[in-house]
Each structure stands twice: as structure tokens, then as C-alpha cells.
Amino acid sequence: MINGKKLLHVTAAALALAASAAAFAQATYPAKPVRWVVGYPAGGGTDFLARTVGAQVSQQLNQPVLVDNRPGAGAIIASENVARSAGDGYTVFSADNGVLVYNPALYKKLPYDAEKDFALVGMMGRSPLIITAAPNAGIADAKALLAALKTSPGKYSIATPGTGSPHHLALELFQREAGVSMLHVPYKGGAPALQDLMGGQVALMMLDLPSGVSAVKAGKVIPLLAMSAERVPQLPNIPTAKELGFASVEAYTWQGLVTPAATPKEVQARLGTELQKAMAEPGVRQKLYDAGWEARPADATEMTRYTDAERKKWHALIKARDIKLD
């Protein structure tokens, strides 16, 4: 039988060993390449952000950061993969508001728990949702848009990358607050929706700038209205919904970095430090700006606060509009 004094010695030794192991893991991390999971296809806005920031993080860690694209089911496939991965610091994930905020309210069952399966590392970037028009739609600006929607409720078709996407939910928010209605046309992805917008098959589209920055610059689509707190730096002439009197209409697509929940706290902290350092690099910020992103670095604490506020806001909307995906 172990007496009290011996038990104290054993406990102290165990704690010292655990602390030593944690310190060793932190000192030697990373000892091999890091896998950066992206829940969308290569070439898209999320992929670009991950590769741009990941390349800088790779330089800082002196280890390869390998992007692993696992598209499908609104990033649910990738989310499950990460949730079931080893929490050893060698798997990170570009988790967006679909993964962390919307999906848990849209689906009765998910193969991951957004609040329990991931450790939040930090925010990276965001892009406000923008209502855009086809060149042949006959709508040149935001005032013309509102006039057309008020005069002809339900007439104008508006594309989104899919039901339950940030774009769709931004549309629902705008319709509710502006007191208008449009014909929602959900696509299977942003690329085909944008293609039909440019071709005039749909009149309008709820667009995130990283997906359509080239089309906007080329004048192939007409940006009308931004759902941001302030004007979009890349589109300074486009008014915000707030400017037109809809103060609560604010909606973005946003990206943060997470790891499996079991990842050691010391490694989470190291990744958070490296992420913030990468996001502060002028070259990284310029690349993101040129691609339509707004760099929005924030640490794990701020990301947690922001995510919680987003859940409260959007879960209420999803319930009020009775939006379900299963």
C-alpha cells in the first residue's frame, strides 16, 4: 500500500513528467510536414487563402505545409476527417462560418460537433456578401435594385452557391430586413452560378468577392450592394446596406484556422502565434486584398467570441425562416 507521502511523490513525479513531455513537444514541434485541410476544391477562394497563408506559415515553421483538398457536402466531409484526425498538431483546418456556425443549425445530425471537436486557433480573413447583377438585367445601382424589387416582388431571380450557404442566409437576412422578395436559385457551387450570371441566365447573384473578383474587375458582372459594416476597400463606390437604411444587414463569408480538439494547448498556442505572424506579413495581406479577401487576423479568444456571436445571430434567423437541410 502506498502511504500519503509516497503518493505525493508519485503525483509530483507524474506532473513533472507531463510538464516535461509538453515542453519537449513544444520545443521540437514541428518535426514533420503539417497537413492543412480545405473543404472546397482547389482554385477557389478558400483554397487560395489557405495556400497563401500556409506558404508563409511553412517558411516560419521551416516545415512543409501541405494543402489537402477534401471538397463535398458543404465542407462536412472535410470537417469529419479533421474531427477524427489525431490531435498531434500535424492537422489544421480552414473552418468557415458554414462549418462552425450554419451547419449545426441546418442539420439535425452531423458527423462532427462544431463546439467540441475543434480547437480554435485564430481568424484569417473575411469577405462581405455582395448583391451583383448580370449586365443584361437592366439594374445599374443599389437604388435601381431596391426600386425594381419593390415594384416587382418575386420577379427577379438571384443565384447562390447553394441552400444553406452563407450567401443564401445573407439573402434571407436582406429580404427580411428590406421587406422584399426574390426568386432564390440555389446552385451546386459558386462557379456555375457565376457563369450563369455572366451569361444572363439569372438576373442577380449573392457573391463573395474572392469567387468573382476577376469577373467584377472585367465588368462582366455589376456589383450593387455590399453587406458590410463599411464600404469594401476593393469596391469603394458600392454602398453598404447600412447606408441604405438596413443597419442590421451585415453578412460575410469568413475563415478561421482550427485543429482537432485534442491538440496540445502548447501546440495550439504555437500555431496561433505563427498564424498571427503570417497574417501580419505585408506580402500576404496584399495577395489577399488582390484576391478579394479582407485580412482579419484575431487570436483564439477573439475567434471564440466572434463565433459565439455569429451562432446566436444566424441560428435565430435559420429558425425564424424555417431553413432545414435534412
Image (cartoon, grey):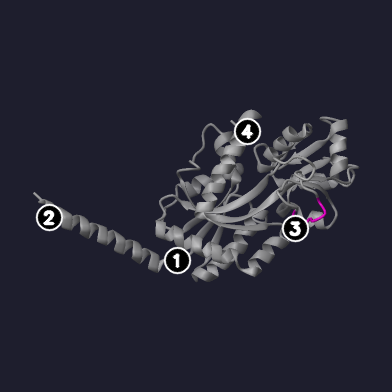
Residues marked 2 and 4 touching at CB (< 8 Å): no
Magenta part mainly helix, strand or loop? loop
Foreground of the two, 25 or 276: 276
Dot 3 lies on which element? loop
* Residue to which mark 1 is pinned: 32
Image quarter for residue 13?
Answer: bottom left
Determine the residue positioned at 54% across, 43% down: 308
Tell me the amino acid under the disc marked 2: Lys
* Residue to which mark 2 is pinned: 5
Residue mark closest to the camera, 4 vs 3: 3
Q: CA distance from mark 2 to mark 1?
A: 42 Å
> Of callouts 3 and 1, which one flags the residue occurring earlier in the amino acid sequence?
1
Residues marked 2 and 3 touching at CB (< 8 Å): no
> Of callouts 2 and 4, which one flags the residue occurring earlier in the amino acid sequence?
2
16 vs 242, left or right, is: left
Determine the residue positioned at 17% across, 55% down: 8
259 vs 186, left or right, is: left
* Residue to which mark 4 is pinned: 318
Tell me the amino acid under the disc marked 4: Ile
Residue mark closest to the camera, 2 vs 1: 2
Residue segment shown in magenta: 232-238
> Of callouts 2 and 1, which one flags the residue occurring earlier in the amino acid sequence?
2
Q: Is residue 185 above or below residue 20?
A: above
Residue 23 on the magenta segment:
no
Residue 170 at x, y percent in the picture: 70, 40
Q: CA distance from mark 4 to mark 3?
A: 30 Å
Tell me the amino acid under the disc marked 3: Pro
Residue 62 at x, y percent in the picture: 50, 71
Dot 2 lies on which element? helix
